[in-house]
Image (cartoon, rainbow, N blue to C red):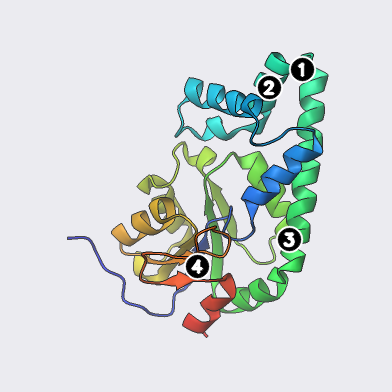
């Protein structure tokens, strides 16, 4: 029988990053457009599939956009190291700027300042570390709000593997029952944390379908203040 979480004021709140703190899916599409790539094109899909097929879809390395750009230029552009690195540099700059503007337009500084005065905050995220640090540089460059960010690349496995949550808990140094996870993915964020006795909230702020089968749902992140005023 899996442990159950009794709703109570937590000491730590863990957040997923992508499509939880900001709309990363939209930002990816716009950043690719800045380098002249249609995110829905068969050429880009082929580059992504090739990398994931070689490395395994659940490998953190299979999310590395530099590998996507390398395969893309080899197949569809005049390949050169400079061409790949130029694409990556322009893409990262566009992604950074997009997410920075999102964060400001969503008034996230106000929300997370308030949360950080009441709780310890951390991030548990799939993705390669460089990409996630670029994002966090746009959102919280001086770690004013989040005490740590843990990426799947560091751990060697992706959510929903329990190892990444176990490591986060060891950093928090508090019982599982004193932690809450907030994320957009039922499979990656909600199910695995509830299975180990952590509280979980499903945020659907950036999902196309504004419904959820979960017990605790957030239409927007601001609603967490209603649960833990």
Camera-side residue of 63 and 215: 215
The image quadrant of residue 64 is top right
Q: Is residue 49 left or right of residue 104?
A: left
The residue under the point 46% across, 31% down is 57
- Choose the circle earlier in sequence order: 3 or 1: 1
- Residue under numbered circle 3: 102
Q: Position of residue 55 (x, y in %)?
A: 49, 24
The image quadrant of residue 9 is bottom left
Q: Secondary structure at mark 4?
A: strand
- Residue under numbered circle 1: 77
Give the mark toward the camera: 3 or 1. 1
Q: Is residue 162 above or below residue 91?
A: below
The residue under the point 82% across, 20% down is 82
Q: Position of residue 193 (x, y in %)?
A: 37, 58
- Residue under numbered circle 2: 72
Q: Is residue 141 above or below residue 104?
A: above
Q: CA distance from mark 1 to mark 2?
A: 7 Å
Q: CA distance from mark 3 to mark 4?
A: 22 Å
Q: Are marks 1 and 2 in contact (CB under 8 Å)?
A: yes
Q: Within 10 Å of the Cα at label 3, are there few (<14), some (14-19), or many (20+) other Cα atoms?
A: some
- Residue under numbered circle 4: 13
- Choose the circle earlier in sequence order: 1 or 4: 4
Q: Is residue 152 left or right of residue 21?
A: left
Q: Is residue 208 above or below residue 154?
A: below
């Amino acid at each position: 029988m899996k442990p159950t979480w009794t709703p109570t004021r937590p000491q730590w709140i863990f957040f997923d990053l992508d499509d939880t703190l900001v709309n990363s899916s939209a930002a990816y599409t716009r950043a690719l457009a800045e380098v002249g790539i249609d995110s829905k094109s068969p050429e880009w899909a082929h580059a992504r599939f090739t990398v994931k097929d070689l490395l395994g879809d659940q490998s953190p390395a299979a999310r590395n956009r530099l590998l996507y750009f390398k395969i893309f230029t080899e197949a569809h552009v005049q390949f050169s190291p400079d061409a790949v690195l130029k694409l990556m540099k322009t893409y990262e700059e566009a992604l950074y700027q997009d997410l920075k503007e999102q964060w400001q337009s969503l008034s996230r500084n106000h929300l997370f300042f308030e949360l950080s005065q009441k709780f310890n905050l951390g991030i548990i995220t799939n993705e390669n570390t460089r990409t996630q640090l670029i994002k966090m540089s746009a959102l919280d460059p001086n770690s004013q709000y989040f005490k740590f960010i843990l990426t799947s690349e560091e751990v060697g496995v992706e959510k929903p593997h329990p190892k990444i949550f176990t490591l986060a808990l060891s950093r928090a140094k508090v019982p599982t029952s004193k932690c809450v996870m907030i994320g957009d993915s039922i499979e990656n964020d909600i199910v695995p944390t509830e299975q180990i006795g952590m509280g979980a909230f499903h945020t659907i702020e950036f999902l196309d379908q504004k419904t959820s089968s979960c017990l605790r749902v957030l239409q927007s992140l601001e609603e967490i203040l209603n649960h833990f005023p």
